[in-house]
Image (spheres, helix red, strand yellow):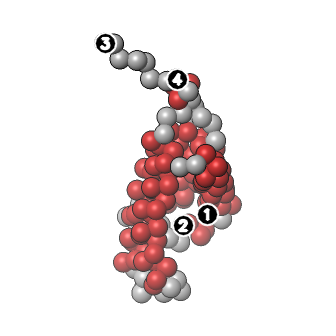
Amino acid sequence: MPPRWYKTGLYTQALLYTAAGFNHLWHPRTYLAIMPDHYTHPAFWVAATGVAEIAGGLGLLVPQTRRAAAIGIIVMLLGYFDVHWFMLQHAADRFAGMPHWALLARLPLQFVLIAWAWVYARRPTGAGAARPAAPRPG
């Protein structure tokens, strides 16, 4: 990946998750409305995921925490499948105001977001990233 695309993608992703996290905290009712019934303490989960998104977004910006932040984002996105699946299952009775295509599109979009985060999870960062590999003996 060209360095310019890498940086643009990194900053875009960091902004996206940081903004989404703050949105969880500023507009919790939006997220409470989509929480599956099987979650206890939904307000806690909305706040916790908001804080996790902020931490992930900011963590992407620091080379020493970039890999851990990206892995955390991936884990968080995997957890969001449950919410998206719940919304799809209850499209007719609880989410009739949302277009069905949008509910369907959210599932494959998760895979795209996971792949995007994986770009930053797999690339070495921090002090070890700049060191060339040691030559093999003999």
* Marks 1 & 3, CB-CB < 8 Å contact: no
What residue is shown at x 54% (from left), y 58% (from top)?
46
In the rendered structure, find residue 50 and report the number of the disc placed on it: none
Sort mark 3 into few (<14), some (14-19) or many (20+) by Cα contacts within 10 Å.
Answer: few
Q: Residue at x 64, y 49 (%)?
A: 4
The kind of residue on which mark 2 rests is: Leu
Q: Which mark is residue 28?
A: 1
**In screen coordinates, is 24 left or right of 110?**
right
Image coordinates for residue 56, horizontal then vertical, percent: 57, 46
Alpha carbon separation for disc pair 2 and 4: 46 Å
Q: What whole-number distance in Å separates the C-alpha atoms at marks 1 and 4? A: 44 Å
Secondary structure category for the residue under label 1: helix
Asked whether disc 1 touches disc 4, contact meaning CB atoms under 8 Å apart, the reply is no
Q: Are marks 2 and 3 in contact (CB under 8 Å)?
A: no
| Marking on residue 131 | 4
Residue topped by disc 2: 32
Q: Is residue 20 left or right of residue 35?
A: right
Residue at 42% x, 62% y: name it.
111
In the rendered structure, which amino acid carries the disc numbered 1?
Pro
Q: Are marks 1 and 2 in contact (CB under 8 Å)?
A: yes
Q: Amino acid at mark 3?
A: Gly
Of label 1 and label 3, which has the lower sequence position?
Answer: 1
Q: Nearer the viewer, residue 41 or 57?
A: 57
Count of labels shown? 4
Q: Residue 138: which disc?
A: 3
Q: CA distance from mark 2 to mark 3?
A: 62 Å
How packed mark 2 is, by other alpha carbons closer than 10 Å (few <14, some 14-19, many 20 or more), is: some
Instruction: Say which of marks 4 and 3 sits in front.
Output: 3
Q: Secondary structure at mark 4?
A: loop
Q: Earlier in the sequence, mark 1 or mark 4?
A: 1
Q: Position of residue 37 (x, y in %)?
A: 41, 68
Q: Earlier in the sequence, mark 4 or mark 3?
A: 4
